[in-house]
Image (cartoon, rainbow, N blue to C red):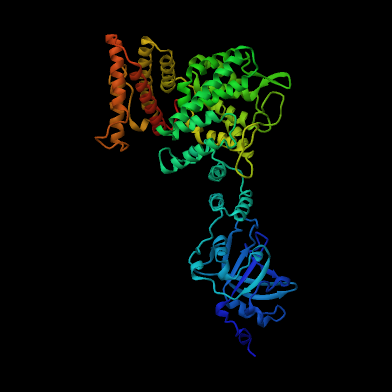
Amino acid sequence: MRIEARYQHKSIATMFNLLVSGNGEWWEEPPFSSSVDRFKEYSGVGGEAADAARPETLRPLEEIPTLLMYEVGAGGPHARIVRHGRLRNIVRRGRDLSFDFELDAVQPYLDQRVVLSFAEPLGIEAFEQHRTHWAIKDANIPPALLATATAQRVERTVKVVAAEYVEALREGMRRDALRLSDELAQFPASVEKALLLLPARILQLSTPELFPIIGIEPRTPEGRRALNAVLARNAAGMDLPDDWAFSFAWFLDQYGSRTEAPQLEAAVGLCAARLTHLGAVEATGGDNVEDIACTLWWVSRSPLLSARLRREASMLMDRLVRRQNQEGFWEITENEQVTAGIRATAFATVALQRLGDDRYHQSIRTAVVWLLAQRLEETGALARAVGELVPDVIATTLAMEAIRRSDFAEDVLHVLEAGDAHLVSTQAANGGWTAGPWPEDFVTAFVLEYFVRRAEILPQVDGFLLMARDFFRKAEDLQLEGGANNRRLAAIATVHAVEMFLYGVFDRREDLALSAFKENGTETLGPREALRTLQEALQRTGVLIAPQRLPHRDNLSALIGRRDGIIHRAHEISTAELDEGIRQARRFITRFGRELLKLDLLQ
């Protein structure tokens, strides 16, 4: 009897081979083989004629399609790739069947996840997806499955795997999520990996700090969904950290609307109470330096809190500076022992850099010099306190930011490189970072905010931009003090802040071919002419389409007019007029600082 006749009860036209291996690199390079012991496991009736001991019965298996697949959960760089083709030269060698494999010329590569979505028509049982074997299936490979094949092997990059992991979590596919989590753990630590896994974190817990990092914009449908998720977490009181009020206020200021105004005001009130309490404790000699520094850091993250709580923050900053050791550090108490606090010093330094002005320059400079000397030699990281040898993620991140903001940044690039590399190296397999006593999601956001925004950090080197920042902060201080003359001075300082910002843009953006000076080379343009000049340059380069005007120009021109009235006619400016002028100036500087300079100037 001819061999083909022995397959007559099941046409070989409706059969295929499925070979599965638990070794994640088994199908990468020839020679290929499969154990005789597991030959024909999970096979249909069509494969009954195949006999490993009779070579002539194996030849028909070379005429049917073949899928080479890895076990679900197997490791390896291409463990999710299924190869489609034909077997050639099947030969028994001892306890193995050896063969060559010829990829299909048109549809060679399939995605394992897609293949398994066709498990029922393919006749693939659940358990065999996790077992090394060779099955001969009584089925066609569906054309709809082959239509998904690719001509080139799709690399299983961290981006691809992370997207599948997020989708599995979203769809509640726990087994797939667990398998993909194991696969993600095999990718090396990187900022990219951490960013790609943020959507997975958000699905599990709505941490406010994560949404802006992944690019969810306020006042969009995605932004509204983010807002609703955070509001729901707040209403449920679900795993709220101690500093939730600051986080919540910061988030509502960015993503909220008028309907959330009462909740925003309540959160701001809690933040104000916190600062007032810390001031009272500090006034009685309480040892809470790190609490004060950390709270000021929270305030510094939010433009709203920085403005609304400026009086309370200024008082705490002044007290903080008075408690600074002459060597540059701040002391903390650990186990009833007073020691130099590295993390406390890093918190205080960054808070002063973000919220302070030139009054604190020497205090900041001394602190940065001290922090530079506290680096652990082997890693370039910093510990929580002097005498400790375990690197601290928070202290290291803050110290790197403090150094980037200082006038030492250009001279110590090797320090920044080593510190950043250490932070990446301490990333957990799930793409996150940990540091007590904060939740993992917050610490992860803390580190990623630094990495994402480090290019926006303005070093504290004298120049137009630093003057713009300090003039604006002085305006806010005068605004808070109140009184007719303080309002006048605040308006003047705000106009000068805008003017210095414009000159800084002209100085840094050489491609715009602008100058802060008139043709005589000695007189500056003045704020009105500088605004007009920038508008024309942006129209010329296509950023604005004529007759489109420079955003905020009209409002700023109105403030400049009031400034002129103050100087030349002793006019007054009302509280409402000043508030609106400062608000427009902040929006202008923030927007064009980021769009034209890639800097977050006021933070």
Instruction: Spot the residue most to the bottom.
Output: 1
**Figure quadrant of residue 326:** top right
Instruction: Spot the residue most to the left.
Output: 547
Number of numbered discs overlaid on the protein picture: 0
Considering the image in quadrants, where does the N terminus appear? bottom right
The reply, left or right, for residue 353 in relation to residue 339 is: left
- Residue 317: give x, y in percent of width and height: 54, 17
Residue at 60% from the left image edge and 29% from the top image edge? 242
**Figure quadrant of residue 447:** top right
| Viewer-side residue, 429 vs 56 | 429
- Residue 125: give x, y in percent of width and height: 63, 67
Asked whether the viewer can see residue 603, the reply is: no
- Residue 495: give x, y in percent of width and height: 35, 19
Residue at 68% from the left image edge and 32% from the top image edge? 378
| Viewer-side residue, 267 vs 575 | 267
Asked whether the viewer can see residue 273, the reply is: yes
**Figure quadrant of residue 556:** top left
Residue at 50% from the left image edge and 23% from the top image edge? 269
- Residue 42: give x, y in percent of width and height: 66, 72
